[in-house]
C-alpha cells in the first residue's frame, strides 16, 4: 500500500501519525521524518510531501490513498474522493482582516492560498474581490498590500510590520480537518484492500 | 509552436495508435457496430442540446451566415444527431461506433488534454438489461483483446441515487443543485443544502453511506439495506441482472460496484459504468444508459453506450507491457532510390523499404547496399550476405 501524507510544515502532523499508528499501521518511522520523503516500512510505502503534490500523485494513481487537509480538497483541482473525516488537525478556514482598513479601496483585495474557495465565498453574496494567490498570505497583509486574507485560522499571523493593524477573524468559511482520500482508480481497483485501510480508522474515529 | 493542450503525434506513437485503433475496431465490428464519422463542426445548438456544461465549453466560431458553430467536444451527441435525423425510420436496434478526436479547452489540473480521441459505441433502440450488458461485455472484450489482463469495470446506477435524492422531499431547485453537488463530489454544498432544507439526519446518513458504497458483490447486499423505495430496489435488481449476463459471457471477474458513481454528464438515466486499470488514475472508459438524449432530437428511443479514452488506454497498455511495438521493421536500401523496380519487388513481397540515394550512409539494420551489379545485405541478427539479386531475395526469404 502506498499512502501519502500531506505536510504543511517541517514534519508530518503528529495527530495524524498517532491515529495511523493506533489503527495498526507502521507509522512509527514517520515521527522523525521530514518532507519530501519516501519511507518504506515492510509492505507500506509512505510519501511525505506538500498537499498539492500528494493530491496530484493520488489522483494519478501513484498513491493508493492519502491523508490531506480539507482546505486543499475544497479547492477542488484534483479528482479524488473523500473516504473518511479523520477528525484530527481541526481548523477553520477564515477571512481575516484588520479591524480598520488602511486604504479605502472600491474593490476588496484579498491574499489567499485557496483562490477558488475564496472566490466562491465572496461571490456567494455578490462581493467583488481581487485575489492574490500566495503561499503565505499573511505577509501581504502585514505589508499593507491587501485588505485581508483567506487562510486557515491557525496560519493567520496577526502582524509584525511596524504600524500595520493586526488581523482579526471576520468570517468563518469552512470547518476543516484531516481527511483520508483515494483517487478514482484506487477506489475501483483496490476494493477490499482499501476497505482494510479505512475500517480500523473509521472505528477509531467513531469511538473518539 | 502549437496552441496549449494540442500535441503532435510522431511516427512511433502514431503506429501504436493505429494498431490499437484497428484492434478495437475489429471488436466493435465483431458485434455488428458500423462506423460513423461526423464533421468537426456542429451547430452550437446541437451540442448544447445535452444541457451539459462540459460539452458546451467548446471552441465557438461563426459561419458565413453568422450562425454559431462549435468544434465538437464529444461524440455521443453528434451520433445521436445522425441517428435521429437519418435513421428514424430504420429498424431498431441501431449499432454505431466511432474512433474520433474531439477538442475541449485545455485543463491540465484535471488531466484534460485539449485534443483527445474517444473510441466508443452507441446501441440505440433497446431499453433492456441485456442491451446494458452487451455494452459492458463489449468493453471487457475490447480491453482483453488488447492484452490488458488486469482491469476493473465498476457499475453504478444513477437511478438509485436519483431515487434516494427524490425520497428526501426537496423542492425542485434544491433537488437539482443536490444532484449536481453529488456528481461533482462537492460535499460541503451537499451538507449546506441538507441543513438549509432541514433534512432529517437519517436521510442524510443514507446518502453518505450510499456514496461510500463500493466494492465487490457484497456491496449489493448493503445497498439493499439502504433502499428506501421501489425505484431503488429496481435499480439494484437491474445491476444484478447486468452482472449475471456479464458473468455468463465470462467477464464477471472484472466487475465491481460503486454507488458513488455519478457522471458529470447529466444525460445518463440508468446504468453507468467506468473501466480502470493499474497505473492510470482516471477511467479508461465511461459509459451508461441515456434514454432521454434522443428525445431532445424529437425521437423518443432509448440508448446505451460507452467511450474509451484512447490516450488513457494507451497509458494503461504501456503500464501493463501490452502496448504494440512502436517501431516498424524497415529495410534500408542504399541505392534503392535509383532502383525503383527492385525496391518495388521487395515491397510487393511485403517488406517495408526505406530507399536511400546511392552512396548514402545507412544507419539501421537490416541494410541493403548496391555495389554496381552486386549487393551486400546486413541482417538484423548480425549476419551478412554478399552476391547477386537472387542471393538477396533468398536471404530475405522471398521468392
Image: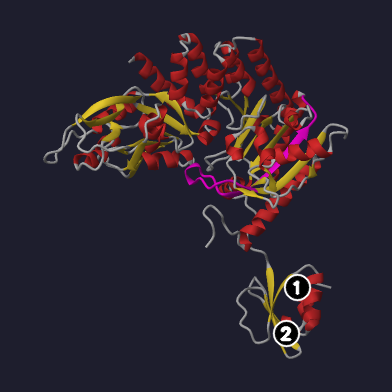
- Badge 1 element: loop
Separation (CA) of disc 2 from disc 1: 13 Å
The residue that appears at 81% across and 38% down in the rendered structure is B85
The residue that appears at 60% across and 41% down in the rendered structure is B284
* Dot 1 alpha-carbon crowd within 10 angstroms: few under 14, some 14 to 19, many 20 or more: some
Instruction: Report x, y in % for residue B148.
Output: 64, 43
Instruction: Report x, y in % for residue A2.
Output: 42, 37
Instruction: Report x, y in % for residue B142.
Output: 70, 42
Q: Is residue B11 left or right of residue A96?
A: right
Residue B223 lies in magenta, yes or no?
Answer: no
Instruction: Report x, y in % for residue A134.
Output: 30, 43
The residue that appears at 39% across and 26% down in the rendered structure is A125
* Discs 2 and 1 carry the same chain letter: yes
| Labels 2 and 1: the sequence-earlier one | 2
The residue that appears at 45% across and 38% down in the rendered structure is A77
* Dot 2 alpha-carbon crowd within 10 angstroms: few under 14, some 14 to 19, many 20 or more: some
Where the C terminus of chain B falls, by quadrant? Answer: bottom right
The picture quadrant where one finds residue A123 is top left
The picture quadrant where one finds residue B137 is top right
Count the numbered circles shown.
Answer: 2
In the displayed image of the protein, which residue is found farthest to the left?
Answer: A162
Viewer-proximal residue among B227 and B92: B92
Q: Answer whether residue A49 is visible to the viewer in this image.
A: no
Chain bearing mark 1 = B
Q: Which residues are magenta?
A: B102-127
For mark 2, what is the residue?
B375
Mark drawn on residue B396: 1
Viewer-proximal residue among B253 and B341: B341
Mark drawn on residue B173: none
Amino acid at each position: 500500500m502506498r499512502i501519502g501524507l500531506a505536510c504543511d510544515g517541517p514534519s508530518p502532523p503528529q495527530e495524524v501519525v498517532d491515529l495511523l499508528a493506533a489503527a495498526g499501521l507502521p507509522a512509527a518511522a514517520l515521527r522523525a521524518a521530514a518532507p519530501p520523503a519516501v519511507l518504506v516500512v515492510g509492505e507500506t510505502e509512505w510519501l511525505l510531501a506538500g498537499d498539492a503534490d500528494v493530491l496530484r500523485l493520488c489522483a494519478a494513481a501513484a498513491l493508493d490513498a492519502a491523508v490531506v487537509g480539507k482546505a486543499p480538497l475544497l479547492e477542488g483541482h484534483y479528482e479524488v474522493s473523500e473516504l473518511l473525516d479523520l477528525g484530527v488537525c481541526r481548523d477553520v478556514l477564515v477571512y481575516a482582516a484588520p479591524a480598520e482598513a488602511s486604504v479605502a479601496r472600491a474593490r476588496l483585495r484579498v491574499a489567499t492560498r485557496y483562490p477558488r474557495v475564496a472566490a466562491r465565498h465572496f461571490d456567494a453574496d455578490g462581493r467583488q474581490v481581487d485575489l492574490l494567490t500566495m503561499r503565505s498570505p499573511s505577509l501581504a497583509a502585514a505589508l499593507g498590500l491587501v485588505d485581508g486574507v483567506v487562510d486557515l485560522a491557525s496560519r493567520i499571523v496577526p502582524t509584525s510590520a511596524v504600524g500595520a493593524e493586526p488581523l482579526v477573524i471576520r468570517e468563518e468559511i469552512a470547518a476543516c480537518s484531516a481527511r483520508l482520500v483515494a483517487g478514482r482508480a484506487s477506489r475501483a481497483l483496490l476494493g477490499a484492500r482499501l476497505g482494510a485501510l479505512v475500517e480500523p480508522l473509521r472505528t477509531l474515529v467513531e469511538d473518539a | 509552436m502549437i496552441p496549449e493542450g494540442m500535441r503532435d503525434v510522431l511516427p512511433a506513437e502514431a503506429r501504436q495508435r493505429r494498431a490499437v485503433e484497428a484492434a478495437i475496431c475489429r471488436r466493435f465490428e465483431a458485434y455488428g457496430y458500423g462506423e460513423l464519422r461526423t464533421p468537426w463542426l456542429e451547430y452550437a445548438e446541437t451540442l448544447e442540446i445535452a444541457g451539459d456544461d462540459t460539452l458546451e465549453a467548446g471552441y465557438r466560431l461563426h459561419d458565413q451566415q453568422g450562425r454559431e458553430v462549435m468544434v465538437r467536444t464529444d461524440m455521443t451527441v453528434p451520433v445521436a444527431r445522425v441517428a435521429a435525423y437519418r435513421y428514424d425510420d430504420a429498424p431498431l436496434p441501431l449499432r454505431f461506433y466511432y474512433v474520433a478526436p474531439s477538442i475541449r479547452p485545455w485543463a491540465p489540473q484535471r488531466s484534460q488534454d485539449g485534443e483527445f480521441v474517444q473510441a466508443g459505441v452507441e446501441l440505440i433502440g433497446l431499453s433492456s438489461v441485456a442491451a446494458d450488458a452487451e455494452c459492458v461485455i463489449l468493453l471487457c472484450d475490447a480491453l482483453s483483446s488488447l492484452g490488458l489482463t488486469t482491469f476493473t469495470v465498476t457499475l453504478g446506477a444513477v437511478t438509485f441515487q436519483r431515487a434516494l435524492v427524490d425520497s428526501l422531499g426537496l423542492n425542485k431547485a434544491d433537488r437539482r443543485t443536490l444532484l449536481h453537488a453529488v456528481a461533482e463530489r462537492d460535499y460541503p454544498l451537499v451538507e449546506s443544502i441538507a441543513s438549509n432544507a432541514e433534512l432529517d439526519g437519517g436521510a442524510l446518513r443514507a446518502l453518505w453511506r450510499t456514496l461510500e458504497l463500493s466494492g465487490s458483490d457484497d456491496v449489493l447486499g448493503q445497498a439493499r439495506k439502504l433502499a428506501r423505495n421501489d425505484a431503488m430496489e429496481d435499480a439494484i435488481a437491474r445491476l444484478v441482472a447486468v452482472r449475471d449476463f456479464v458473468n455468463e459471457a465470462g467477464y464477471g471477474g472484472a466487475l465491481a460496484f460503486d454507488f458513488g458513481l455519478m457522471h458529470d454528464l447529466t444525460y445518463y438515466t440508468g446504468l453507468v459504468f467506468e473501466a480502470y486499470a493499474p497505473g492510470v488514475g482516471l477511467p479508461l472508459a465511461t459509459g451508461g444508459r441515456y434514454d432521454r438524449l434522443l428525445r431532445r432530437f424529437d425521437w423518443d428511443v432509448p440508448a446505451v453506450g460507452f467511450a474509451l479514452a484512447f490516450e488513457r488506454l494507451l497509458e494503461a497498455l504501456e503500464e501493463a507491457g501490452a502496448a504494440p511495438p512502436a517501431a516498424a521493421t524497415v529495410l534500408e536500401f542504399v541505392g534503392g532510390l535509383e532502383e525503383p523496380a527492385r525496391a518495388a519487388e521487395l515491397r510487393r513481397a511485403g517488406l517495408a523499404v526505406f530507399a536511400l540515394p546511392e552512396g548514402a550512409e545507412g544507419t539501421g539494420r537490416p541494410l541493403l547496399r548496391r555495389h554496381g551489379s552486386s549487393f551486400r545485405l546486413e541482417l538484423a541478427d548480425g549476419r551478412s550476405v554478399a552476391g547477386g539479386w537472387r542471393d538477396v531475395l533468398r536471404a530475405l526469404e522471398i521468392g
